[in-house]
Structure formats: structure tokens, C-alpha cells
């Protein structure tokens, strides 16, 4: 279904279902031999959402073969590397003394429950109200306890989220570590700029930011989204990812940040894979331009 300026969702529908999809990939990645990540909550969180395809996937109750198995494997490897990249970003920021973290579009991110945050760290999680509510309830049912002081901010990132963040106790005078993981494609181009403007205004000197940026959403990424959605539709997951992404020209996140007072460092996805001793999979899948996934750029930035 096409996006609207005021659309909303839960973890089983529209953009919310993508949070469940990536959590399923994290659950599987956590069980691999020589796993890069360990997310002990992902599988239970996915089961609690109750989308049959992803529940079967994490429980190993679905037999994928051929290109379907290869496509699922690619998604799992990408999420393993991506998760580790953002985990390491927070650990480095904590090592540098930062005690305030903000997870934008938190979805089923369990970092507030599984990373070894230094004492005194406050972690803010921002997402739409139904997502926050369901994740908080699911974690309580699982019996998980946060490893930092977790504060939730239930708000749409196209609305006045800085006001909501302040209301939750955020301190703009303290350096902050921000992540925007798996978010930018779901924001219209101007909302992406506004997001970075707001982050910049809220970031004391020394604050850090990590995100991922895809330079060509309109053609290469959209084609891949459609191919992936067709693949999963055959297995009962009927959300067209490419309908959820905003195409059109947008500012390159790295250049935009560099122009707004951030020292920016970028790495193409295959380099991030290599840094973790992995090779970006070289697959040719029917009707699926997996080359698009190579083009993603991992960004870290420091407010100067
Ligand atoms: N960052 C999480 C992760 O990597 O596991 C979730 C990523 S999921 C692909 C996209 C997330 O973005 C969803 O949780 C969705 O609710 C959130 N999101 C997208 N647009 C949003 C908006 N306008 N306001 C609040 N949350 C939004």
C-alpha cells in the first residue's frame, strides 16, 4: 500500500513489519557457526509479533531452496554485519565516555537489553507508538531487563520528535551517540534532511552518529525490493518493500552531514564485510539485482 504523510503501523504491518523482518535475520545470524552477533531476544520477539513466515523462518520450519535460500542467506549476512557495525559503534562511543544514546527507529532493536553499557548510561528508543508499546510488552513477557536506563519515546519521526525526546529527559548539553539503522529509506527526502538538522541541533560537541545510506533508492534498490517482495510473497509474507521506500532525489547523507558541522567517515558495505573477515556474497539471483546491496555506505560521524 502506498505511503502517506501520516501513516502508522504496528510490528506486523507496513513499515513495522520490516522491523520484524530484520529481527528474524538477526535471530538466524545469532545461531550461525562463528556468529558475528549474539541477539538472544530476536527470535522470541519475532515469535511474539506472530507473522507466520518470519516465525517459521526463525524456528527453521520453512524449507527454502535455490534462489530463495540464497536470498535469505544474503539478508542474514547483511544483518549480521550491519548489527555488528552498530553494536561496535555504541561500544566505541561508550569507551570514549559517552553516556547518552539514542536509537532512532528502534523497532525490535534489543541493544538496550543486551549491550554492556557503562553504569549511568541512558538509552532512548524512538519509534511509532504501537511499535514501542508492543516491543516493551514483549520484552517484559520474555523476562528481559534493560542493561542501561531505557527510556522510550513513542513518536513519529516526521513529527516534533525533539520535543518528545526532551520531555523524556534528554540532555542536549551532554554528548550523545545516535544511530539511524534501517531508517533513511522510509523517510521522504526532506524528512531525512530535517532528521539530520534536528540531530545536529541536539548534539553537543563530541556527539557521534552512525547510519547507513543507499545512494540509489529509486532504481537499483527499488528493483531489488520488488524482487525480494515477490520471493517472500510466495511464502505468505505480503508486504511490498519497495512501496514503503521513498524514492526521488535526496541529499547524500554523508555530504549533508559534512556540510552541517560533522566530521564524517564512510565505508562501502563490502569494506565493512571485509573488516569483519567476511566477503560480500557474489550472488546472481533470478530477477534480483543483488548488486544494489553492495552500494550501501556505512557512515560514522563526530560533531565537531
Ligand atoms: N532500527 C531497527 C533495526 O535495525 O532493527 C528497525 C529497522 S526497521 C527496517 C524500520 C523501523 O523504522 C521500524 O521500526 C519503523 O517503525 C521505523 N520507522 C520508520 N519510519 C518511521 C517514522 N516516521 N517514525 C518512527 N519510526 C519510523
Image (tube, rainbow, N blue to C red):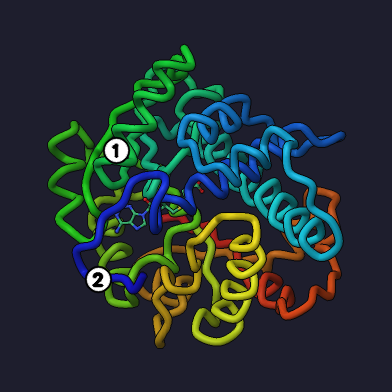
Q: As rendered, which of 180 and 259 lies closer to the eye?
A: 180
| Residue 4 - label | 2
For image coordinates 63% across by 51% down, the residue present is 82
- Which of disc 2 and disc 1 is earlier in sequence? 2
Q: Is residue 232 among the parts visible in the rendering?
A: yes
Q: Are marks 1 and 2 in contact (CB under 8 Å)?
A: no
Q: Is residue 145 left or right of residue 100?
A: right
The residue wearing badge 1 is 174
Give how far across and how far down residue 142 sits, in percent: 48, 17
- Number of numbered discs overlaid on the protein picture: 2
Horizontal side of 275 relative to 228 (left or right) equals right
Left or right of residue 257: residue 133: left
The nearer-to-camera label among 1 and 2 is 2
SS at badge 1: loop
Residue located at (57% from left, 34% from top) = 91
Asked whether 88 or 137 is in front, the reply is: 137
Which of the image's four quarters has the C terminus?
Answer: bottom left
Mark 1 and mark 2: Cα distance apart in space:
35 Å
The residue under the point 23% across, 53% down is: 156
Seen at 42% across and 46% down, the residue is 12
Q: Residue 160: percent from the left, percent from the top? A: 15, 55
Q: Quadrant of the N terminus?
A: bottom left
Q: Label 1: few (<14), some or many (≥20) within 10 Å? A: some
Q: Which mark is on residue 57? A: none
Identify whether 107 is placed above or below 69.
Answer: above
Q: Quadrant of residue 244?
A: bottom left
The residue carrying mark 2 has its beta carbon less than 8 Å from ligand 1: no
The spot of residue 212 in percent (x, y) is 53, 62
Which class describes the residues within 10 Å of circle 2: few (<14), some (14-19), or many (20+)?
few
Q: Is residue 208 visible?
A: no
Helix, strand or loop at mark 2? loop
Amino acid at each position: 500500500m502506498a505511503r502517506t504523510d501520516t501513516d502508522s503501523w504496528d510490528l506486523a504491518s507496513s513499515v513495522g513489519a520490516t522491523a520484524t523482518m530484520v529481527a528474524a535475520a538477526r535471530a538466524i545470524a545469532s545461531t550461525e557457526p562463528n556468529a558475528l552477533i549474539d541477539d538472544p531476544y530476536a527470535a522470541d520477539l519475532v515469535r511474539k509479533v506472530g507473522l507466520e513466515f518470519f516465525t517459521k523462518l526463525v524456528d527453521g520450519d520453512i524449507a527454502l531452496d535455490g534462489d530463495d535460500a540464497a536470498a535469505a542467506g544474503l539478508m542474514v549476512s547483511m544483518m549480521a554485519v550491519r548489527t555488528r557495525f552498530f553494536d561496535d559503534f555504541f561500544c566505541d562511543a561508550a569507551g570514549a565516555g559517552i553516556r547518552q544514546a539514542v536509537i532512532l527507529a528502534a523497532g525490535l532493536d534489543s541493544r538496550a537489553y543486551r549491550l554492556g553499557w557503562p553504569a549511568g548510561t541512558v538509552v532512548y528508543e524512538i519509534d511509532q507508538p504501537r511499535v514501542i508499546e508492543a516491543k516493551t510488552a514483549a520484552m517484559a513477557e520474555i523476562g528481559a531487563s534493560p542493561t542501561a536506563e531505557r527510556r522510550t519515546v513513542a513518536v513519529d519521526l516526521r513529527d516534533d520528535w525533539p520535543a518528545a525526546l526532551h520531555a523524556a529527559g534528554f540532555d542536549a548539553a551532554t554528548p550523545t551517540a545516535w544511530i539511524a539503522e534501517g531508517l533513511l529509506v522510509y523517510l521522504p527526502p526532506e524528512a531525512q534532511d530535517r532528521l539530520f538538522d534536528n540531530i545536529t541541533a541536539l548534539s553537543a560537541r563530541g556527539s557521534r552518529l552512525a547510519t547507513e545510506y543507499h545512494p540509489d533508492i529509486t532504481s537499483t534498490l527499488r528493483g531489488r525490493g520488488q524482487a525480494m517482495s515477490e520471493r517472500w510473497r510466495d511464502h505468505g509474507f505480503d508486504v511490498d518493500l519497495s512501496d514503503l521506500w521513498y524514492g526521488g532525489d535526496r541529499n547524500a547523507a554523508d555530504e549533508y552531514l559534512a556540510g552541517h558541522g560533522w566530521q564524517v567517515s564512510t565505508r562501502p558495505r563490502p569494506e565493512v564485510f571485509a573488516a569483519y573477515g567476511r566477503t560480500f556474497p557474489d550472488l546472481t539471483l533470478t530477477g534480483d539485482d543483488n548488486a544494489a546491496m553492495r552500494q550501501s555506505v556505512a557512515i560514522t560521524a563526530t560533531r565537531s
